[in-house]
Image: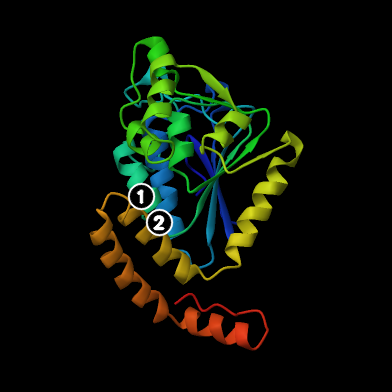
Amino acid sequence: MSDYTTILYDDSVPPVARITLNRPDKRNPITPITVGEIIHALDTIRQSDAIRVVVITGAGKVFSAGGDLSAMSGRLGDGPQSPAGPRSLVDLFPAMHGLGKPVIAMVGGHALAGGMGLMVACDLVVASDKATFGLTEINVGLWPMMITAELVRNIGRKKTLELMLTGKRISAEEAAAIGLVNHVVPADELDAATSALAEQIAERSPAAIALGLRAFYATQDMDLQTGLRHLEGQLGKVLALDDATEGITAFLQKRKPIWKGR
């Protein structure tokens, strides 16, 4: 869609679509309009059989420095009106986890405050060795409320509270060490490394991935027995897929599978 006001959306090179936070002059803030536009783009992706993987990144030198403190209401001033209404992170995070298609954050610069929250909500993260990360809200008397839910599910209570209470920034290497980032690569290799990962995943069964991702997030807060029962039911659905039949047959015949996506 060409008339977004805070993001760029590109699905012209399937099977990967790219969402780019596109206000580099403001360090790509996460405003309610930005959130609404990302959700709108994800809805488009959900309906596309051609798109199997999503990459979220930021224009310029910063992934996102978090909320726009000069426009906390979500208004963008006198600029063009967005086709998407303002939304909250409360809407965005479930939309990402329920998409059924992997979302990869490509982080080339600072990912701070709400920008770090968006990054953590992605399924995978590839970061430049120049990137830095931090929950800097406390430095201006704020607190990263909704981000708490994502952080404690990724790195645990102690490290989450340390980042929230100190507002300090950490390097890409430390972010990888505590489980915030999957891969750290040289800055000039970031795009190629992210594309390679996206293309590798796109070669897998989209139907199995959709069921798997939704089961992964659905069970994260269930008790063990309830979670196991739910996963057992989801395994039955995976085994009933045409893609499962094709995958097993292709393995036995020593050939590359041809996925049907169902």
Q: Count of labels shown?
A: 2
111 to the left or right of 72: right
In which image quadrant can residue 145 be found?
top left
Residue 99 disc label = 2
In which image quadrant can residue 252 be found?
bottom right
Q: Few, some or many C-alpha atoms within 10 Å of disc 1 (few <14, some 14-19, many ≥20)?
A: some
Q: Few, some or many C-alpha atoms within 10 Å of disc 2 (few <14, some 14-19, many ≥20)?
A: some
Q: Is residue 260 visible?
A: yes
Q: Position of residue 132 (x, y in %)?
A: 59, 25
Q: Position of residue 70 (x, y in %)?
A: 40, 15
> Which colouring convention does the figure follow?
rainbow
Q: Position of residue 216 (x, y in %)?
A: 38, 57
CB atoms at circles 1 and 2 under 8 Å apart?
Answer: yes
Q: Position of residue 18 (x, y in %)?
A: 57, 49
User: Which one is in front, 8 or 145?
Assistant: 145
SS label for mark 2: loop
SS label for mark 1: helix
Residue at 36% of width from left, 43% of height from top?
93
126 over 45 or under it: above or below: above
The C terminus - image quarter: bottom left
Q: Residue furthest front?
A: 225
In which image quadrant can residue 13 be found?
bottom right
User: Which one is in front, 229 or 205?
Assistant: 229
Dot 2 amino acid type? Leu
Residue at 57% of width from left, 22% of height from top?
25
Residue at 39% of width from left, 54% of height from top?
43
User: Which one is in front, 246 or 16?
Assistant: 246
**Residue that numbered label 1 is attached to:** 95
